């Protein structure tokens, strides 16, 4: 019974976070895309881009709503499901959680303003200007919450006396060793995901209906951004791996099935483990793990053997890591291919195959977010606060978590379904071409606005 | 003032803010439903949507602010309330989730359906009812701690006159606050048919509000004598509260100065809410958590207060801008923008 509540607590948290992160990622990245589109639209006085910003915003509010309600759920659940964790860690990490709320507050206020003031100002830059606090608010909420997660991986900023935390230094806790790489990677991966998803939606529209200038411009913009942020994401991922090698070696070792400490370590891709726990059927890149971990093909990489058995993360995180990295390179490849095709005059970057690939890249990017988080969280097992508190110690003792799990499962199914239905209705009944004429009637005649 | 006192004061102010803005929101949902059932929705629903659309997310953040803040300043609350409130709070989350997202789906998405209006109206009354359980629990006597494990005494809770009177009070207060605000908003919009309707709502719900408040007062005296005595010592605050209530009702009755009427209602609840809160001192959960023993470390407390001041400097100008654009911009209120 005891173990069951722990398991259900973990499942409940994983489910809520896994659901929230979809909308949270959109909440961080989409405002940037909207803002860029609106800026280009005003600058070039091109109604296509302005309409792009409008339509993205309209979809965005639906996802924000789900982000807000699931965020409220996870915020409360952190106390409801992990009371012992919050009682102890609350002393050290409540500062970033508190500041996160301010970031939301800021974002929420300006989102309200942005949504309802499209045509209210003569100077269009004023309206565009209101998009900046939304980007900043969303970005900072990601930064603050990520410092909390970073703290759980490399806790610092306190001393232990009689089993409780004392001499707390909240700033040191926030600026722990995991923070820089984590924040960088979380932000860039949110941006690449949003760019890829918007590109994918555009590609689907083109495949389903017909191509217009509006769609071409949208695709060009989003694919350029995908490329840019995919590069940054891979760079940030590389930094993250180097961070792990230095500070959390067991996580990287588990992801790489790297059992023994050695120099010139191989990178293992996919495969499986046989009875003797040896990787089989894998792709080996000689020396690449050393390179990933330390930027040097001959460097020594700590293996799992260096850690006590009961402090080793589960080995299946290998697949999560591999899938994430593979998707990372796929995104980069797809975006590069598109840009190359677009550069070459004789090739057509809007051929069916290319569009299908782009349509695939959006969902793939979101999957990479999920895989990445599952890797990061499972790779911390058995700890909730690494080295100080295990997951088992932290969970609630309430026997009702199982009921709550199913209750929330039902909730997320309803929310997810309704969200998709609403978004589809919103855009199906209202194609871009018609809306262009409605909002910018003079555009057809060729004069500006 | 010590940092824990600053902390609880700030949090209490925010909870009061949530009480007001959320009441307007929740009550409006109920009125929208009622208006639809009685075929009067064309009269007020436009008005309601116009106010609510830009601000519902802000309302939600008030709540998030409160519970993140209370766990920050008083981590012990996470342990006791967290364990005990798993079920009621989960229900509240689910209702909040349904309400918030349905609101977005329907308003930004497609046309309104009666089922949705019903859910929207009903959840507006059920959320405060389930959240108010936390207030009941804080009075003590509903939590037991056995071999290091905390749980809620459901039987006692459901049979307690205190919990039901608090639930009743929360629901009628919401309707009263909301109706008075809508009267003010309608008056600003010079929407006379709507004003006429919501003014009757406000008049109607004023009497139950004061009756429920008195009942709760009496029931509390039997449940938690210490709290009751403390509140009696603060008699002048409750006196002021009743005074403002009378002013509000008088103004509503005379059909003028609706803005002032709403401010009076705000003051009525301000004094009652703070009288109640100060009387609660020093306990956050009678008798397990007191403000002084349950507080976080001084360094964290001070950091939180500093973050709070920094945050306010950012938020207040933004909130003023929001209100200028939507609440005090007569053209917007009238629907011309
Ligand atoms: C679009 C999403 C995406 C993509 C393409 C990648 N990642 Fe990632 N990765 C994430 C999304 C993500 C994430 C969701 O943002 C994670 C989860 C936790 C975190 O800090 O970031 C993450 C975690 C994460 C970690 C663990 C960090 C930690 O626990 O401290 C490492 C080592 C990498 N990533 C490395 C990479 C590498 C080498 C990639 C090669 C291209 C890569 N990631 C692509
Ligand atoms: C950045 C903020 C995050 C915080 C503070 C956080 C916190 C937690 C906590 C307290 C737990 C329970 C203890 C545990 O099992 O380790 C947990 C587990 C988990 N979280 Fe996170 N998490 C964060 C982000 C995410 C995200 C975005 C995902 C998305 C997929 C995620 C996926 C999981 C999973 C899969 C588990 C279950 C691990 C298990 O079953 O052992 N986490 N997280
Ligand atoms: C890295 C993981 C996370 C990211 C990037 C993230 C980001 C966001 C964003 C951007 C929003 C605003 C919704 C929107 O604009 O779409 C949001 C909502 C929210 N998140 Fe998360 N979040 C993460 C994990 C968490 C965790 C672990 C918690 C728990 C403490 C949490 C608590 C909340 C709350 C309370 C809200 C609602 C706030 C409101 O009412 O506006 N988030 N999150």
Image: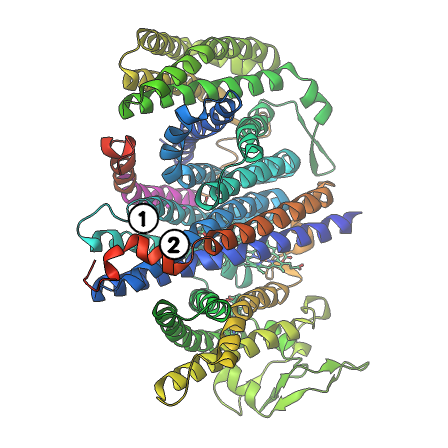
Kindly indicate whether the residue at mark 1 contacts the one at mark 2 (C-beta within 8 angstroms): yes
Q: Dot 1, how many residues are within 10 Å of its Cα: few (below 14), some (14-19), or many (20+)? A: many
The image's colouring method is rainbow
Q: Is residue A157 visible?
A: no
Per the rendering, the mark at residue A57 is 2
Rendering quarter of residue B305:
top left
The location of residue B85, given as percent across then percent down, is 63, 35
Q: Which SS type dominates the magenta stretch?
A: helix
Where disc 1 sits, the SS reads helix
Magenta span:
B298-316
Number of numbered discs overlaid on the protein picture: 2
Q: Position of residue B22 (x, y in %)?
A: 44, 30
Depth check: give the residue in front, A174 or B47. B47
Question: Which residue bears the numbered disc 1?
Answer: A114
Q: Residue at x 36, y 15 (%)?
A: B196
Q: Which sits earlier in the primary sequence, circle 2 or circle 1?
A: 2
Chain under label 2? A
């Amino acid at each position: 019974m005891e173990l069951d509540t722990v398991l259900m607590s973990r499942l409940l948290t994983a489910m809520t976070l896994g659901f929230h992160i979809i909308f949270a990622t959109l909440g961080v990245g989409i405002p940037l895309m909207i803002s860029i589109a609106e800026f280009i639209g005003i600058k070039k006085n091109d109604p296509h881009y302005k309409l792009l910003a409008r339509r993205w915003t309209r979809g965005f509010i639906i996802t924000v709503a789900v982000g807000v309600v699931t965020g409220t759920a996870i915020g409360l659940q952190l106390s409801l499901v992990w009371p012992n964790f919050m009682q102890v860690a609350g002393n050290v990490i409540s500062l970033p959680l508190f500041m996160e709320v301010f970031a939301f507050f800021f974002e929420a206020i300006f989102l309200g303003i942005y949504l309802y003031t499209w045509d209210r100002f003569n100077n269009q830059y004023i309206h565009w200007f209101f998009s900046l606090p939304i980007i900043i608010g969303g970005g900072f909420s990601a930064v603050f919450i990520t410092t909390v997660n970073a703290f759980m991986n490399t806790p610092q900023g306190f001393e232990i006396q009689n089993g409780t935390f004392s001499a707390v230094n909240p700033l040191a806790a926030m600026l722990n060793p995991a923070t820089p790489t984590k924040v960088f990677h979380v932000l860039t991966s949110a941006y690449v995901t949003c760019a890829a998803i918007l590109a994918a939606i555009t590609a689907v529209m083109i495949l389903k209906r017909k191509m217009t200038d509006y769609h071409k411009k949208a695709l060009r913009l989003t694919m350029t951004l995908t490329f840019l942020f995919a590069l940054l994401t891979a760079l940030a991922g590389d930094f993250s791996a180097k961070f792990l090698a230095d500070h959390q070696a067991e996580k990287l070792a588990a992801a790489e099935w790297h059992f023994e400490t050695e120099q010139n370590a191989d990178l293992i891709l996919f495969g499986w483990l046989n009875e003797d726990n040896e990787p089989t059927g894998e792709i080996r890149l000689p020396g690449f793990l050393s390179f990933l971990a330390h930027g040097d093909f001959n460097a020594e990489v700590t293996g799992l053997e260096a850690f006590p058995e009961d402090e080793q993360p589960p080995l299946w995180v290998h697949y999560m890591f591999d899938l994430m990295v593979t998707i990372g390179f796929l995104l980069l490849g797809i975006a590069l291919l598109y840009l190359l095709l677009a550069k070459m005059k004789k090739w057509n970057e809007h051929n069916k195959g290319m569009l299908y690939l782009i349509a695939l890249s959006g969902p793939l990017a979101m999957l990479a977010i999920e895989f990445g988080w599952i890797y990061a969280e499972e790779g911390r097992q058995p700890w909730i606060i690494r080295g100080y508190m295990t997951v088992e110690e932290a969970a609630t003792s309430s026997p009702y978590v199982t009921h709550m799990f199913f209750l929330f499962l039902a909730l997320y199914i309803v929310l997810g379904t309704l969200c998709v239905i609403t978004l589809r209705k919103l855009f199906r009944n209202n194609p871009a071409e018609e809306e262009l004429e409605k909002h910018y009637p003079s555009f057809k005649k060729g004069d500006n606005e | 003032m010590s940092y824990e006192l600053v902390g609880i004061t700030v949090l209490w102010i925010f909870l009061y803010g949530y009480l007001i803005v959320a009441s307007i929101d929740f009550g409006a949902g109920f009125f929208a439903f009622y208006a639809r059932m009685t075929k009067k929705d064309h009269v007020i629903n436009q008005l309601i949507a116009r106010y609510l659309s830009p601000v519902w997310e802000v309302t939600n953040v008030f709540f998030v602010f409160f519970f993140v803040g209370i766990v920050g300043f008083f981590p012990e609350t996470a342990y006791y309330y967290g364990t005990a409130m798993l079920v009621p709070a989960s229900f509240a989350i689910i209702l909040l989730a349904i309400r918030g997202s349905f609101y977005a789906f329907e308003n930004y998405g497609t046309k309104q359906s009666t089922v949705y209006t019903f859910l929207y109206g009903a959840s507006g009354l059920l959320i405060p009812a389930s959240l108010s359980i936390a207030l009941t629990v804080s009075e003590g006597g509903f939590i037991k701690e056995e071999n290091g494990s905390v749980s809620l005494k459901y039987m006692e809770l459901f049979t307690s006159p205190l919990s039901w009177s608090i639930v009743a009070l929360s629901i009628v207060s919401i309707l009263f606050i909301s109706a008075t605000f809508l009267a003010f908003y309608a008056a600003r919009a010079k929407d006379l048919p709507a004003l006429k309707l919501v003014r009757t709502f406000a008049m109607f719900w004023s009497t139950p509000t004061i009756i429920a408040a008195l009942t709760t007062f009496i029931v509390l005296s039997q449940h938690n004598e210490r709290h009751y005595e403390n509140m009696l010592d603060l008699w002048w605050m409750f006196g002021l509260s009743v005074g403002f209530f009378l002013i509000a009702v008088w103004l509503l009755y005379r059909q003028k100065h609706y803005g002032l009427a709403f401010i009076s209602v705000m003051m009525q609840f301000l004094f009652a809410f703070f009288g109640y809160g100060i009387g609660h001192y020093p306990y956050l959960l009678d008798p397990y958590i007191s403000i002084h023993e349950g507080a976080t470390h001084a360094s964290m407390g001070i950091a939180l207060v500093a973050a709070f001041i920094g945050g306010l400097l950012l938020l207040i100008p933004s909130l003023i801008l929001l209100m200028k654009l939507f609440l005090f911009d007569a053209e917007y209120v009238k629907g011309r923008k």
